[in-house]
Image (tube, rainbow, N blue to C red):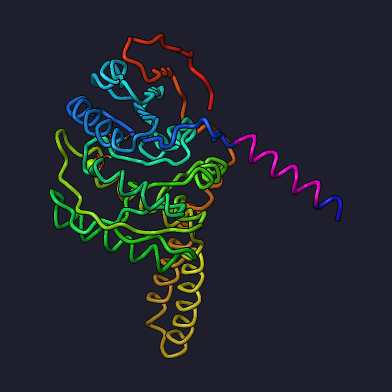
Amino acid sequence: SDQADALLNRYQDQSSAQSKSSPQSPLLSVVIPMYNEEEVIEACHHRVCKALDQLHDACEVVYVDDGSRDNTWSLVETLVSPRHEIIALRLSRNFGKEAAMSAGLKAAKGQAVILLDADLQDPPELMPDMVAQWKKGYDVVDMQRRKRFGESWFKRTTAAAFYKLINRLCDMPIPQNVGDFRLLDRRVVDEINRLPERNRFMKGLFAWPGFNRTTLVFDRDPRQAGETKWNYTQLLNLAFEGISSFSTWPLRLATLAGLVVCLLATVLTMTGGSTVLLAVLLLGGVQLLSVGLLGEYVGRLFIEAKQRPLYLVMQEERKPASDTWPETDIREAELC
Ligand code: UDP
Ligand code: MG
């Protein structure tokens, strides 16, 4: 109908208006979140630019300083490249890697975007291979780790268990052992940028749009310098965020457990009086569990309902590709 056509047109207008890509866009944007990474920045910049030079095309590097408390920002400010544009974003505080990546994805203008860790655990030298896959027509190139050097047995097993669990619970497959290191085509980036949720479990969000995907396998290097920015509480939090924002299964689990315990309690009370205490305890346990689960989801609704921005950009600098020291464009605390 006409109305449907009008709606469709409006939708298409909106998506093209929001898309930052045009024929003049850089071929590739590399988004690098950084939190207290002063020790690796220079090595990282050097290796990234060297890898980009091999593409023989104008690229862009987006550094996002996620509220570092060391010298990260003053170092990032000095970075330039003769061939590639450097964009430096400074968030107003530490918002976490997921928010920093969202900020970088919003700022990126490239026809494709690669997300890379600053600590050089994801080798920048693989970027030309990723771009080659993209040029073959894939919209997403997931980078799967074969080995995880320099990570403890405990971290590796808990990570594996997490991927197993989340894949059981979610409707769409979240690839095992694929971190945030990946290439996304512009249309996937535009879709991810449009997702409104505050709880940003990026591994789920990256899987959500679908499109044509392929996987490259690589060996993950140990951290170049500095130490991991995650502790186990944060990882547990991330895991729970991932599960609860992509699955309502835990809620159903609570209902099922409640059902089972009710039946059990009925049977027990029918077979003898002394089991009353047991029945009460069981029921109490299931009630607490269910209320807790409800609370988790209600809490997430509460966070979504507030509609707070995911992050605040305090400062933004753009350094076009040039041999001379360029003028910088500094904007004050801008809302995203
Ligand atoms: N990072 C960030 N904000 C944070 C924590 C980490 O931007 O709050 C960045 C960090 O600087 C690095 C990447 O996220 O570039 C991955 O962090 P890390 O190496 O500490 O994680 P791991 O590799 O141990 O999982
Ligand atoms: Mg790391």
Q: Nearer the viewer, residue 89 or 227?
A: 89
Residue appearing at x 36%, y 49% in the figure: 132
Q: Nearer the viewer, residue 281 or 43?
A: 43
Tell me if 231 is positioned left or right of 295 in this view.
Answer: left
Residue appearing at x 14%, y 51% in the figure: 149
Based on the picture, tell me whether residue 210 belongs to the magenta stretch. no
Name the quadrant where ligand 2 sits. Answer: top left
- Does 56 sit above or below residue 248? above
Q: Nearer the viewer, residue 323 or 12?
A: 323
Splitting the image into 4 quarters, where does residue 54 fall? top left
Q: Main secondary structure of the magenta part?
A: helix
Q: Nearer the viewer, residue 246 or 216?
A: 216
The image shows residue 220 at horizontal and vertical percentages of 20, 50
The image shows residue 112 at horizontal and vertical percentages of 44, 41
Q: Quadrant of the N terminus?
A: bottom right
| Magenta-drawn segment | 5-18
The image shows residue 203 at horizontal and vertical percentages of 40, 51
The image shows residue 293 at horizontal and vertical percentages of 46, 58
- Does 304 sit above or below residue 282? above
